[in-house]
Amino acid sequence: MPIRLQTERLLLREFRPYDWDAYAPMLADAEVMRYMGEGKTFTRDEAWRAISAVLGHWRMLGYGMWALEEKATGALVGRVGFIDPPGWPGFELGWMLGKPYWGRGFATEGAARCLRYAFEELRRDRVISLIRPANLPSIRVAERLGETLAGEVELLGSKALVYEARR
């Protein structure tokens, strides 16, 4: 199961059953989900299945998404980590935050820690982030991480930009 990582302000840990209460409203928020996946919101039950899928990704591949917890408050602020199921365009570093946590640098802080983990521990040579063209905040995060635009792909029915970082 997931190892724990830390930054100055964040704990990256495995999802737990009690996270459902905080995670479900994030996935039900149209603004949060606008650029995620197919851009659709999730019901509370679908949010539970999403947590299960995250845990399954860890079990099947040995890496995945972490629950992103603010150390100072213990609040679940979002998720950050890796996605690479069969048929995916590459080893992806992704992030998503609940709206109250936007603009505080949490995505960059958590993703930077993940990127270091990917290069140092998982020995990846290339990490991508798939970002919808209109998602300017995520593009800025990718650029702060040192990722550069490497192309575009069709992803879940619409265009995604491929940002990449290389070791």
Image (tube, rainbow, N blue to C red):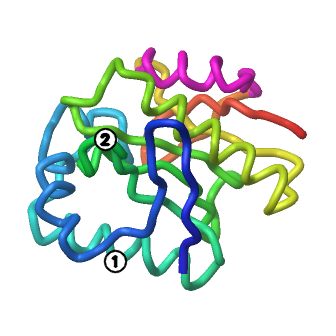
Name the kind of residue labelled 1 in the image: Ser
Q: Which of disc 2 and disc 1 is earlier in sequence? A: 1
Quadrant in which residue 2 is drawn? bottom right
Q: Please tell me how crowded label 1 is: few (under 14), some (14-19), or many (20+) other residues with Cα within 10 Å.
A: some
How many marks the image carries: the answer is 2
- 23 left or right of 161? left
- Name above or below for residue 29 compared with residue 118: above
Q: Residue 93 magenta-drawn?
A: no
CA–CA distance in space, label 1 to label 2: 26 Å
- 10 left or right of 20? right
The residue labelled by disc 1 is 52
Residue 62 drawn at (x, y percent): 65, 77
Residue at x 63%, y 18% (from the top left corner): 144
- 154 left or right of 163? left
- Asked which secondary structure carries label 1, the reply is helix
Q: 8 or 144: nearer the eye?
A: 8
Per the rendered image, the range of residues in magenta is 135-150
Q: 9 or 158: nearer the eye?
A: 9
Which quadrant of the rendered structure holds the C terminus? top right
Residue at x 72%, y 52% (from the top left corner): 117
Q: Which mark is residue 9?
A: none
Q: 49 or 66: nearer the eye?
A: 66
- Name above or below for residue 14 compared with residue 74: below
Residue at x 53%, y 29% (from the top left corner): 108
- Asked which secondary structure carries label 2, the reply is loop
Name the kind of residue labelled 2 in the image: Ala
- Name above or below for residue 158 compared with residue 48: above
The residue labelled by disc 2 is 72
Quadrant in which residue 52 is drawn? bottom left
Observer-side mark, 1 or 2, equals 2
